[in-house]
Amino acid sequence: MSAAADALAEYRPALRPRVLLSDALLDGAATVHLIKDTDSGSSFRVGPKEHFLIARMDGERSLREIGEEYAREYGRRLDGARWQQILRMLGTRGLLAGADARTPAGPAAPAGSAVPATRPAGPAEPARGVLRGSVRLVADADATTARLHRAVGFLLAPGWLVPLLVLVVAMEVVVALHVGELLVDARELFTNPVLLTGAATLLWFSTALHELAHGVVARHHGGTVAEIGLRWRLPVVIMYCTVGNYLYLGSRWQRIHTALAGAVMNLLFLLPFCALWMSAPLDPATHDALGALLLLGSAQAIAMLVPFPPLDGYRIVSQLCGATGLAASTGTYLRLVARRDPAAADYPRRARTAYLGYGLGSVLVLVLILAAVVAAAHHLLTV
């Protein structure tokens, strides 16, 4: 072995501390891992073999040791040219610690021997500003969320969370049992501009808490919040809270908890109003307005769990399926199946199950939504 080859074999690469790696995710027929540089915000997709190598670049293991692990796993060894290409690719992306100084130089990989290069994980974030319909509300969203977590994070402990969830379920049972009455209350609410304005304001505040809940729960699981701000598509103005490393949280269930947090917050917000509606001595107009608020707020929370992009329910289903770009991949696969294209058979069983299940589930959800709308309209027309 030449001195250069020996030096390369003993090199101990390390990823920069702020580089994140995701779990395995379905992407069409392929399985990919996402890599994100949190300093630049750029992210890329790589295959399982590349992830196997990159995940072991901890500064402790040499390329020789990593290569031996790779050979045991995949039954083949990487030569020096391929190692050079991998290191050059990571260095060019700025993913290696001290890439310029520490990555050994070497010849370019010969044609046909390249390890598949990384590719962007998604479109770049659009520029934000007042003219583009969004503006940041805080300079340091992560620090703001950390303060919120210190203030209310105790509610995420089982001793607090479980009783609150029991109350939420009980409230929704009450709403379901009185849905006909509440539909009439909602219709009447829209004829009272003053009460309608009050209810709309409360529901908007609920959406703000919804967004902050995503950030607080992500923070609880070790996540970071990139932005908190306002976004508008007139006449609608909403608050947003962007979890910068959502796909890189420690486990699938942590990501599901983070996505679910917003809808749960919407329902928790309704608890005191439910108590007033059920027990407080109120005039009929206020009582009916509170009933309408319960129905509309519950519908708002449930709507967020519909499994269509960009809603929270879509994020949850994507995590359950272990997929990125689930809707697009499902559409592609189902078109192949409909055309009886042989390429559909190239999809692994896990992907076929996920895409077929999501496709059929989406149709079922649409049918249920349509049935609910028709039933509500029929009730209001016959009362």
Image: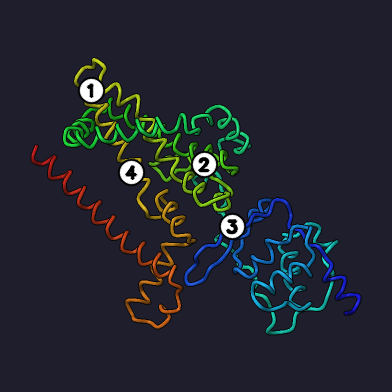
> For the residue carrying disc 2, how many other residues have a C-alpha within 10 Å: few (<14), some (14-19), or many (20+)?
many
Answer with mark 2 or mark 4, whichever residue precedes in sequence. 2
> For the residue carrying disc 3, how many other residues have a C-alpha within 10 Å: few (<14), some (14-19), or many (20+)?
many
How far, Cα to Cα, is label 2 from label 4?
19 Å
Horizontal and vertical percent position of residue 229: 53, 39
Q: Secondary structure at mark 4?
A: helix
What residue sits right under mark 4 in the picture? 302
Horizontal and vertical percent position of residue 261: 45, 40
Q: Quadrant of the N terminus?
A: bottom right
* Label pair 2/1, CB-CB below 8 angstroms: no
What residue sits right under mark 3 in the picture? 22
Answer with mark 2 or mark 3, whichever residue precedes in sequence. 3
How far, Cα to Cα, is label 2 from label 3?
21 Å
What residue sits right under mark 2 in the picture? 241
How far, Cα to Cα, is label 1 from label 3?
49 Å
Horizontal and vertical percent position of residue 19: 68, 54
Q: Secondary structure at mark 1?
A: helix
Residue 7 vertical placement versus 268 (above, below)? below
In front: mark 2 or mark 3? 3
Answer with mark 1 or mark 3, whichever residue precedes in sequence. 3
Nearer to the camera, 74 or 36: 74
Kind of residue at disc 4: Ile
Residue 309 vertical placement versus 285 (above, below)? below
Kind of residue at disc 1: His
Using the rendered view, name the quadrant where residue 269 is placed: top left
In front: mark 1 or mark 3? 3
In front: mark 4 or mark 3? 3
